[in-house]
Amino acid sequence: MLDERQIIDGCCRKDRKAQKALFDRYGAVLLGVCIRYSNRRDEAEDILQEGFVKIYSNIRDYAGTGSFINWMKKIMINTSITHYHRNLKHAWHKDIDQVQETDIEGRGYDEADFTKEELLNIIHDLPDGYRMVFNLYAIEGFKHKEIASMLDIDINTSKSQYSRARGLIRRKLYILKKWPEPSDDEE
C-alpha cells in the first residue's frame, strides 16, 4: 500500500496506479464535499470527476505544506461553485417572501437532538443559493466577503441567503420533530 507522499509523487509522474490509489483513498470523502453543493448524486459524481481531473492536472502545484486533503477539498469546492455558476438558470430565490425564521431556543438538548443524516437531508433540500452560502459559511468557514467574491454576489446577499437558509433549516427541524411552530409574536 502506497503512502500519501508516494501517491502524490506517482500522480506527478502521471502513473495510473497512483491516480487510482488517490481516487480509492480520497474519493468517498471528496464525494461528500460535492454532494453538499449539488442537487443530485449523479451531479455530485460529475463534479467529483471534474475535480479529480483538476487534481491530477495540478498536483505538481501542491507545495507539500498544509493538509493534502484540505488542498483537494478546496479544489472540489471551487469545482462545485464553477458547476453551480455554469448551471445557474435565473434566480437565487425560491419563494423568498414565504421564508420565516424560527428559533429552537428554549428546547432541551434531548429535544433538539437530530441525526447527522436528518440535518444533511434538510440542508440538501435547500434552494441552490441558500445551500451554497450555508455550506460555504457554516461548514467550510468562509467569511461573507469571501463568499460574495466566490459566488459573484453582493456581501448583503450572502448574509441574507445564510439567514434565510438558517430559517428554513429551523422550520424543517420543527416539522421533523413535530413540534408546534412558534407563533409570530413568539419569534
Image (cartoon, grey):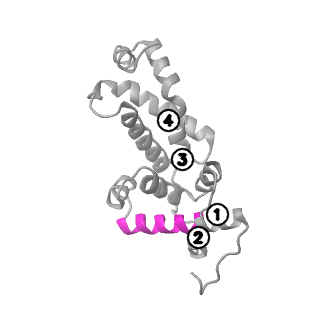
In the picture of the structure, the residue carrying the numbered disc 1 is: 173
- Spatial separation of the CA atoms under disc 1 and disc 4: 27 Å
Percent across and percent down for residue 13 are 35, 13
Magenta stretch in the rendered image = 155-169
**Where residue 30 sits: x, y (%)?**
49, 35
10 Å neighbourhood of mark 2: few (<14), some, or many (≥20)? some
Instruction: State the quadrant of the C terminus.
Output: bottom right
Q: Quadrant of residue 5?
A: top left
Q: Earlier in the sequence, mark 1 or mark 4?
A: 4
Q: Label 4 neighbourhood size at 10 Å, few (<14), some (14-19), many (20+)? A: many
Which sits earlier in the primary sequence, circle 3 or circle 2? 3
For marks 1 and 2, the one nearer the N-term is: 2
Task: Tell which tag, 3 or 2, sits nearer the viewer.
Answer: 2
**SS of the residue at dot 4?**
helix
Q: Amino acid at mark 3?
A: Arg
Residue type indicated by callout 1: Leu
Q: Which mark is residue 30?
A: 4
**Residue tagged by mark 3?**
36
Q: In the rendered structure, which disc, 4 or 2, sits on the residue that comes first in sequence?
A: 4
Residue visible at 43% across and 43% down in the picture:
77
| Circles 1 and 2: CB atoms closer than 8 Å | yes
Residue 97 on image: x %, y %: 57, 76
Separation of marks 3 and 2 at Cα, in angstroms: 24 Å
